Amino acid sequence: MIKLFQKTSLITLIVCFSAFIAKAQLGYNYAQYDIGVGAGMNKVYGDAETVTSTASVHFNFTYNATPYTNFVWEAQLGKLRGGDSVLTKSGRYFNNDFSAFIFRGQLQFGEFLDYSNSQFNNALKNLYVSAGIGFVFNNITQISRTSEKVAGFYTDGENKSKEPFVPLRVGYELKLYNRYSQPSAKIDLAYGYNIILGDGLDGFTAGTHNDAYSQITLGVKFAIGSASTSYRKQITY
């Protein structure tokens, strides 16, 4: 009888201790990997005289070193367009069916903010800045190089090119939590500015400045994998 009581007590202690440990980890654990998809509205700042908004789709994979320090691999597919062959003096118009591949680091403010006793900091913790390196493949499907308003005016360039670029980004990642208080889904709203290290994004070689394109993006990410790891402080409050 005594042995049975001792065994029962030991099992009860183990169960209670395990429950305590599990409860203590609520709000601290997170998945290390996310997959995501998004959409963007793009604008090219190059050699065409007018700017046009176009759409793109984005696919990404994220490694979360912590909930607030992330490394993102991203692929973008879409269109870039600008100019007008009739209404502008240069006559420049282009349509680019582009693809871009990006690796960037992302630092969220929660990494260094104390948000445990501040509603403002708790809201601010998901704000982030990001930078990295990318490669864009340009495929000019439509282009006008001559001007109808200036006789003999012609702009040279290439219809196909590939160029490195620097992606800069600021955004906000709204975290959605599961019943264990772990971030299971994330809604990402961001503004990006991509500095091309060349002049072929619009198919025109002109001017003294390289091309660039901006993006407003909205995406969603989902945690993947059954394994999770712990952070040094509680993620959700």
Image (tube, rainbow, N blue to C red):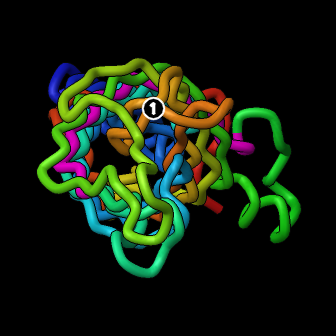
Quarter assignment of residue 59:
top left
In the picture, measured across the screen, residue 110 lies left or right of residue 22, that is: right
Q: Which residue is mark 1?
A: 205
Quarter assignment of residue 188:
bottom left
Give the residue drawn at x 67%, y 30%. Answer: 208
Q: In the rendering, at what x and y percent does residue 204 appear? A: 40, 39
Which one is nearer the viewer's eye here, 36 or 67? 36
Q: In the rendering, at what x and y percent does residue 154 appear? A: 40, 45
In this figure, what is the number of numbered marks?
A: 1
In the picture, measured across the screen, residue 43 lies left or right of residue 35, that is: right
Which stretch appears magenta? Answer: 95-110
Q: In the rendering, at what x and y percent does residue 25 appear? A: 48, 39
Q: Amino acid at mark 1?
A: Thr
For residue 13, say whether it is visible. no
Which one is nearer the viewer's eye here, 199 or 230? 199
34 to 143, vertically: above or below: above
Q: Residue furthest front?
A: 151
Give the residue drawn at x 63%, y 44%. Answer: 234
Q: Is residue 97 magenta?
A: yes
161 to 129, vertically: above or below: above
Which one is nearer the viewer's eye here, 91 or 126? 91
Neighbourhood count class around disc 1 (C-alpha, 10 Å): few under 14, some 14–19, many 20 upward? some
